[in-house]
Each structure stands twice: as C-alpha cells, then as structure tokens.
Amino acid sequence: MTDTASSTAISESVQEFAARARTWLAENMPRIDPDKPPFSVRAEAVSWERAKELQRRLYAGGFTGICFPREYGGLGLDHAYQRAFDAESRYYEMPLILNTPTLTICAATILDMGSDDQKRDRISAVLRGDEILVQLLSEPSGGSDLAGVITRADRRGDRWIINGAKTWSTSAFAGDYGLMLARTDWTVPKHEGLTMFLVPLKSPGITMRRIKEANGSEEFCEEFFDGLELGDDAVVGEVNNGWEVASRQLFHERRAVGGGSEFASGSGAENMQELPTDYVALAESTGQGDDPRVQELAGQALVRRIVKDQLIPHISRAVATGALPPTGGTLIRLFHADQTEFEVDTTLAIAGTAGVVDSGDGLMDIGVRYLSRQTASLGGGSSEMARNVIGERILGFPREMAADRGVPFNQVKRGKT
Ligand SMILES: Cc1cc2nc3c(=O)[nH]c(=O)nc-3n(C[C@H](O)[C@H](O)[C@H](O)COP(=O)(O)OP(=O)(O)OC[C@H]3O[C@@H](n4cnc5c(N)ncnc54)[C@H](O)[C@@H]3O)c2cc1C
C-alpha cells in the first residue's frame, strides 16, 4: 500500500504527483467548501479521533509524511511535493490539528535529534494516525526562561525519576507522548544541565489537568510529575545536552507558527479564528460599507496581510540559502503575531458594539475572539523574546544582561531565596 505509493511517488514529477493526489482525494476524502470548512474544536476528544481517522485514510493512500524519510514511513520527497499536495487537498477535510505541534514540531525534532528507535517508532506511529505528540516545556515559574526549568530528573539505578510540573501544554489531554525538558545536573550553568525526555503521557506518576481559559476553551493542560519513572530509552539526544534538542524544537516551532514548515500537511484554516476576516462583508452587515474610516481600517489590515504572505517565502528562501541564520524564522513569527493582533483589533473596531452584544447575528464571535488576541504573541515564545532573538542573533546587538550566565544553577538566586 504505502510502499507501492512511495515507490511510485519517488519517480514522479511534482505535476504527476499532484494529478495522482487529485484523483485519490476525490475518491477517498470528504469534500468541503474551503471558505466554510468543518472546524475541529481542539478541546474536544472527538476532534482528535476524527483527525486520526482522516490521517489513517491518507496513510492508506500513501499521502502522509511527504517530507519525512521513507524509513520512518514518509515519502522522502521535497517541499514542492508537499505544497502541490496542499493545493489539491484544499477542497477536502484534512486532519489539520495533527500539524502543530505533532508533525511540524515534535516529529520534526525527533527526526533531527532522536534515536533510531524513537524515529522509527514515534514518527511512523504519527504518520499512521495512531499517535499524537505534544510539548511539555513551560513551567508554572515561567516559560520565557526555558533554560531555567526546575522540573528535575534524578538518576536512581538505571532509571530516571521525574518530579516537577509543566503548564500550557497544548492538547496534552489527547497526546500519547510529550517532549519534556528536565534538569539532570544542578551543578553546572543552566543551559548545560538539561535533558530532553520523550514521556509516555499515560504513565503512572503523571497527573494531568485541563486549564480553563477566559474564552471558555479548555485545550491547555498542566501536568504534575510525582516520581514518574523513565528509562534511558526515553532520553532524546544526549543526557545534559537537552538545550540543543530544545533549540532545535524552538527552530521548528518558529517555522511552524509562521507557516513555513515542510512537515505540515494541508493548508486550510484550522479553526474559525484563523479564517481571515471578510472586511467588506463585515462593513456591509454593520451598515458601514461607504464609511471612509472603515474602508481605511480594512485597507491597512489587507495590505499587511499581503506583506505577511510574501514575507513567508522570502524569509524561508533566505534561511535556506544561508542569507539569514536559522533564527531568521523569528521574523515571520513576530510579524505573524503582530498581524494577528492588528486584524483582531481592526475587526472589533469595525464591528463596534455589534461585536460585544449578542444580537443573534453571530458577530459576538468577534468579541469572544478578542479575548484570546494575545495567543499568537505568546505561543511558541512571546513577541518580546522574539525581538530579543532578532536583536541578538540576527542583527548582532549585544546580548542582554543575565545575572545567571555562567553560574552553576544551584547557586542561581530564584524566587525568595
Ligand atoms: C497558544 C499557546 C500555546 C502554547 N503551547 C504550549 C505548549 O504546547 N507547551 C508549552 O510548554 N508551552 C506552551 N505555551 C506557553 C508559552 O510557551 C509561554 O506562554 C511563553 O513561553 C511565555 O511564558 P510565560 O507565559 O510563562 O510568561 P513569562 O515567561 O512569565 O513572561 C511574562 C512576560 O515577561 C516578558 N519577558 C520575560 N522575559 C523577558 C526578557 N528576557 N525580555 C523581555 N521580555 C521578557 C514576556 O515576553 C512576557 O510578556 C503556549 C502558549 C500559548 C499562548
């Protein structure tokens, strides 16, 4: 099945591949109106079951993991094939919620840094539609200072014993494995004593709770580790070299958030919040179609939308050719966050009171959307941190002062100590 499809695919041109995908999609996947797609609510388990079912269909047809190597269940093709498939699949229901973080961040990081077993077992399980992967990085004490994590992994015999807590884990309730950063050596500076683990989320020793957000969603989770036991096979990369793995993970996250990952499959809006505002329809439905102020507001947002669309391939090319360092993806990530807030603000400004008073016309969704306007400037690291990266790593400005630089972590002052 996939083998045949894979071996066929490898000798195909992009156009032939796209034509074969077109035929297969028409026969095997549910057709949708791309302007009114069936959204999946990430906080609901049923959405994940549906996504897995769709992924299994795609796998059976030989259209998953287009850019993942063949030995791990992918097709081993380049991004042009994935883009061609995305264009064809726009008219079909796709398992879009499997893209981030499962495919674009976690599987991509395992591919770069994992052991042969981890790559073979986890990536192929994800591509088959059997598993979901999540990220366990942020902690209650703060997410920006990722290298300052205090979840600990202590060696006991041939086992690792994990104690601590993680938070803001997107979709972790639906996950099977999580990439979890923990401290394994407290006697060295903070970046040097970290190890990344691949944690089976249903293990004893993990208590997971949902977090309720201001907009009512309960997609985020927090996890508490009380004596969770892991073997050496759970270590991703090398012990005490977890910062390298985390850096790779952040690299993939920046590309994923900005829409530049070759490991994403399907290109439609994942949820209603991602659907771009139709400013003309909004202006007309609120009786402001001829208002020059509203036209100007909408024009500004639309111009920036075009800039964003052009920025993504521009930066991706610059990173690929080495004209920009790998951290260049941060430019896309920052513009994406700013643009998201600009559009949310513009939409509410045009909707006015209709966006906050429920008149049964659906416009109050705009107000509810406003409650989570900052997510794009926090998820995947905050916009302030993105500006730091751009300043220090791209523009070459001096690094900001850090009182803990070079200091053994157990001597760093924290909290009230
Ligand atoms: C949509 C979304 C999805 C997420 N998914 C996940 C996930 O799956 N897994 C996970 O582990 N985490 C996840 N997070 C958490 C996210 O990574 C953190 O929110 C983020 O790293 C910021 O950490 P914090 O919220 O603890 O804020 P803090 O680190 O406490 O920062 C508070 C404020 O201080 C600013 N700040 C901190 N340090 C500096 C500095 N050096 N210079 C300038 N400003 C600074 C920050 O920018 C921020 O405004 C997600 C968050 C969101 C919004």
Image (spheres, rainbow, N blue to C red):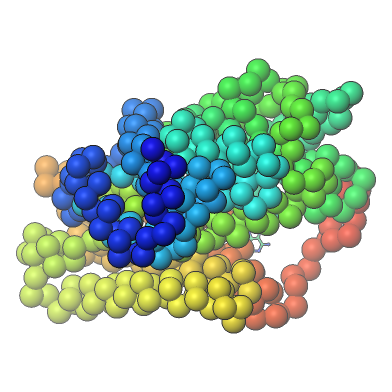
With 222 as the anchor, is 350 left or right in this view?
Answer: left
Image quarter (top left, top right, bottom left or bottom right) of the N terminus: top left
Left or right relative to 268: residue 285: left
Residue 380 locus on image (x, y percent): 54, 54
Q: Residue at x 63, y 74 (%)?
A: 325
**Residue 172, position as x, y percentages in the image:** 52, 34
Above or below, comparing residue 230 to residue 263 in the picture = above
The residue lying toward the viewer, choosing from 261 and 414, is 261
- Placement of 103 over or under 133, stated as above or below: below
Quadrant where the image shows the C terminus? top right
Quarter occupied by residue 347: bottom left
Residue situated in front as seen by the camera: 279 or 75: 75
- Answer whether residue 208 is visible to the viewer in this image: yes
- Describe residue 16's horizontal placement relative to residue 260 as left or right: left
Picture quarter containing residue 81? Answer: bottom left
Residue 43 can be seen in this image: no
- Location of residue 75 with respect to 197 vertically, above or below: below
- Indicate the position of residue 197 as horizontal and vertical percent values: 70, 38
Q: Nearer the viewer, residue 245 or 383?
A: 245
Instruction: Please give the name of the residue rendered at 23% of the width and 53% of the height, measured from the top-left corner.
Output: 22
Residue at 30% in and 61% down: 16
Please tell me how many numbered marks the rendered image carries.
Answer: 0
Q: Is residue 205 above or below residue 52?
A: above
Residue at image point 46% right, 31% down = 130
Residue 387 point in image, percent of width and height:
59, 70
